[in-house]
Amino acid sequence: MRLLITGGAGFIGSNFVRYMLKNHPNYEIVVLDKLTYAGRIENLQEILDIIEFIRGDICNEEDVKKAMKDIDVIINFAAESHVDRSIDTPEPFIKTDVFGTFKLLEACRKYGVEKYVQISTDEVYGSIIKGSFKETDPLDPSSPYSASKAGADLLCKAYYKTYGLPVLITRSSNNYGPFQYPEKLIPVLIIKALHNQFLPIYGDGTNVRDWLYVEDNCSAIDIVLQKGKSGEIYNVGANDEWRNIDVAKLILKELNKPESLITFVEDRPGHDYRYSLDTAKIRDLGWRPRVKFEDGIRKTVRWYVENRWWWEPIT
């Protein structure tokens, strides 16, 4: 089996590459990544000799063609993914997340891949006060980022219905863990706490997220790849909900820092209050999250403490 992992030098993509090498050593891994600010070759440096790495853009037909040689499966992690950046500058999100997905789907048609897995997000559903979103619920994105991911999902569904393309979609809750670029909440809080700086929390800190350790998401994507049904969507979540303020307090506790470092800042536009996913469908495939949030935070904090070489040059 020969896998093309687009965006494989990013946070979740690089963790997935390592996961697949560990759990499926017979697979050949090809990584296509543009190496933007968040896609870093350092994320793959210890495994570059056992994968094929191609620097390229999924929006560029020639780059995609080069990466498609003898590929059986495409797993598309490539995306602009930071909500705040999408609010400031939406265009790269539309180009990469929507047009880039279109280019990959066209390549699938042309080269006849066996499966295409689109990595999406719970943010396409919008916010929910009570209950949990099911895969059949309507999409109601709140930011240019989530709208671009929703657009990509709809393209994937259309290519399945129109062309019979063997497409699968995973929508996960908030990931965290090693190699996450320090613009997302958890690495920002860890690094600022290490420097005894104020930890910025939007609004009053009561926004709720379901936190999923990145390796648990990798195992979910793997099981969808192995057992998922073409044309289907699978929610992936830990069902482990935390308020942002409590996440900050837990990180400060792990680092033995005072809660007085927490500071509240003006909320961002269109900030969804709560995300929550019904994960019964993927659990029926046999998947379960293994890492509880407190344990995952402990592992994540330790990784950032022990790997300053990775994040200090980019902060």
Image (cartoon, rainbow, N blue to C red):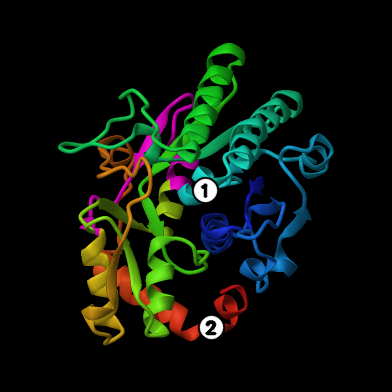
Looking at the picture, does residue 168 appear above or below residue 78?
above
Residue identified by numbered label 1: 81
Where is residue 292 drawn, in percent x and y? 25, 64
Point out the residue furthest to the front here: 266
Looking at the picture, does residue 18 appear above or below residue 103?
below
Q: Residues within 10 Å of mark 2 (few under 14, many from 20)?
A: few
Q: Amino acid at mark 2?
A: Arg
Residue drawn 63% across and 41% down? 92
Q: Pointer 1 and pointer 2: residues touching (CB < 8 Å)? A: no
Residue drawn 28% across and 70% down? 263
Q: Amino acid at mark 1?
A: Ser
Point out the residue furthest to the left here: 130
Residue drawn 24% across and 84% down? 258
> Which quadrant of the rendered structure holds the N terminus?
top right
- Nearest the viewer among 313 and 117 is 313
Looking at the picture, does residue 94 appear above or below residue 35?
above
- Nearest the viewer among 241 and 52 is 241
Where is residue 186 drawn, in percent x and y? 38, 66
Disc 1, SS: loop
Q: Looking at the image, is mark 1 or mark 2 earlier in the sequence?
A: 1
- Asked which quadrant contains residue 309, the reply is bottom right
Where is residue 111 drawn, in percent x and y? 75, 29
Q: Is residue 70 magenta?
A: no
Disc 2, SS: helix
Residue 308 got which mark? Answer: 2
Where is residue 229 drawn, in percent x and y? 45, 28
Q: Which residues are magenta?
A: 221-243
Looking at the picture, does residue 286 appear above or below residue 251?
above
Point out the residue furthest to the top here: 162
Residue 105 got which mark? Answer: none
Q: Is residue 230 magenta?
A: yes
Kindly report the distance in space between the C-alpha atoms of the residues bearing marks 1 and 2: 23 Å
